Image: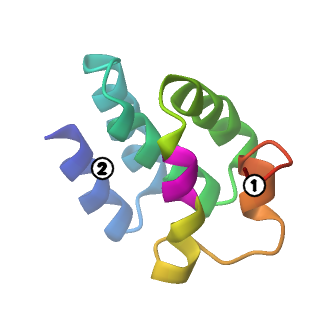
Amino acid sequence: EWMNRGDGLLGAGDTEAAMQAYRTAADLLPENEEIQFWQAVTMADLGRLNEALPIFRQVFQRNPLWKVMVKRLPPAGLMRDEPGLIEKILGGNSE
């Protein structure tokens, strides 16, 4: 529910409220890697990479398969295709 609310707020242009909704979702289900992954993706896509990186690291530590997913996002149009962004997210390597 909170992720959907965040998506709606983001679509309406209310970035801060969307980020709060995503944080609430992550706080309610801290074991849910997917919520944290998409929270970090949204932050990175909005240019808030410094906030996103610790979340990505935590998700990747729990399940390295998310590294494969993040590399697929720009070609799928689900994340901006900025040179070097994926490498930064992956910690300087693209395993």
Q: Amino acid at mark 2?
A: Gly
Mark-to-mark CA distance, 2 and 1 = 29 Å
At 33% from the left edge and 69% from the top edge, which residue is drawn? 11
Q: Quick check: 63 left or right of 90?
A: left
Say which of 64 and 89 sits in front.
64
- Residue 40: image location, x then y, percent: 53, 44
Element at badge 2?
A: helix
In this rendering, the answer to whether 80 lies above or below 63 is below
Q: Mark number for residue 32?
A: none
Tell me, yes or no, whether the highlighted magenta stretch contains residue 69.
yes
At 47% from the left edge and 55% from the top edge, which residue is drawn? 15
- Residue 23: image location, x then y, percent: 40, 30
The residue wearing badge 2 is: 6
Element at badge 1?
A: loop
Q: Amino acid at mark 1?
A: Ser
Q: Quick check: 72 left or right of 44?
A: left
At 86% from the left edge and 48% from the top edge, which residue is drawn? 92
The residue wearing badge 1 is: 94
Q: Quadrant of the N terminus?
A: top left
**Of all residues shown, which one is farthest toward the front?**
95
At 54% from the left edge and 55% from the top edge, which residue is drawn? 68
The stretch in magenta equals 66-70
Question: What secondary structure do most residues of the magenta stretch adopt?
Answer: helix
Say which of 17 and 78 sits in front.
78
Q: Quick check: 10 left or right of 51?
A: left
